[in-house]
Image (cartoon, grey):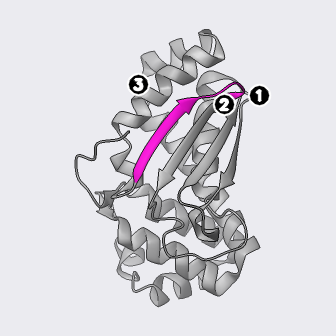
Amino acid sequence: MSAPAETGRVGPNAITRMAEAISLIAGNGARDTIFTEAGLGAYLADPPTRMVPDEDVALLHATAFALLGVPLARRIGAEAGRRTGAYLLAHRIPKFARLVLPLLPRRIALHLLLQAIERHAWTFAGRGVFAWEATREGFALSLADNPVSRKVSAEEPVCDYYQATFETLFQALAGSGIRVEEIACSARGDPRCIFKVTL
């Protein structure tokens, strides 16, 4: 289970990659409207480079879902997650890990990667709680009180941002066939969001 070092703040990718994804999929006008309605317009004028309050991320996702609807907001979340994963691979994953992990058996590589992710979980979970465990098929990851789904109500899982971030990292570092699927989500009333990782 993660032990937050700076509770309630997350990395700026949670804002900047969402801005990019909204522009790409829904247009600059939609991006400006969503950020303004969420009270986050200042981030467009001065994109964050430091940790941001996870409540801002919660407001951003809630506003995107409210204004764009679930299907489009999920597409945007997935695109933002892929962009976040690509950024992490390029700038945050040590070169040694990028070279060695793909050479290991998938389960071992993922086990090592998840240990590292758990140590840094506060950077993406904010005040939420991240945990993981091995399963017969692979692994199960859980996020309780995460900012993506915290203020969203839906009949289906909505944490495509995390799903895509995880899958991008796992496929690049442990095996291209790895799949991540969200099978429980607090947005639809589940106690926590759970992601099934299949090797």
Magenta-drawn stretch contains 8 = no
Of callouts 3 and 2, the N-terminal one: 3
Please tell me which residue is depicted at 36% across the width and 65% down the height of the picture. Answer: 54
Please tell me which residue is depicted at 62% across the width and 78% down the height of the picture. Answer: 65
Task: Tell me the amino acid under the disc marked 2.
Answer: Gln
Position of residue 27 in the picture relative to residue 133 (left or right): right
Return the residue at label 3: 94
Res. 47 visible in picture: no
Residue 76 drawn at (x, y percent):
66, 66
Mark 3 in CB contact with mark 2 (< 8 angstroms): no
Return the residue at label 2: 171
Task: Tell me the amino acid under the disc marked 1.
Answer: Gly
Return the residue at label 1: 177
Task: Tell me the amino acid under the disc marked 3.
Answer: Pro
Residue range highlighted in magenta: 129-138
Q: How far apart are labels 1 and 2 at the CA level?
A: 7 Å
> Magenta region, mostly helix, strand or loop?
strand
Circle 2 crowding by C-alpha within 10 Å: few under 14, some 14–19, many from 20: some
Residue 167, quarter of the rendered image: top right
Q: How far apart are labels 1 and 3 at the CA level?
A: 22 Å
97 in relation to 85, above or below: above
- Looking at the rendered structure, the secondary structure element under dot 3 is loop
Mark 1 in CB contact with mark 2 (< 8 angstroms): yes
Q: Which mark is residue 75?
A: none
Residue 9 drawn at (x, y percent):
30, 59
Viewer-nearest of discs 3 and 2: 2
Res. 132 visible in picture: yes
Of 183 and 90, the residue lying toward us: 183
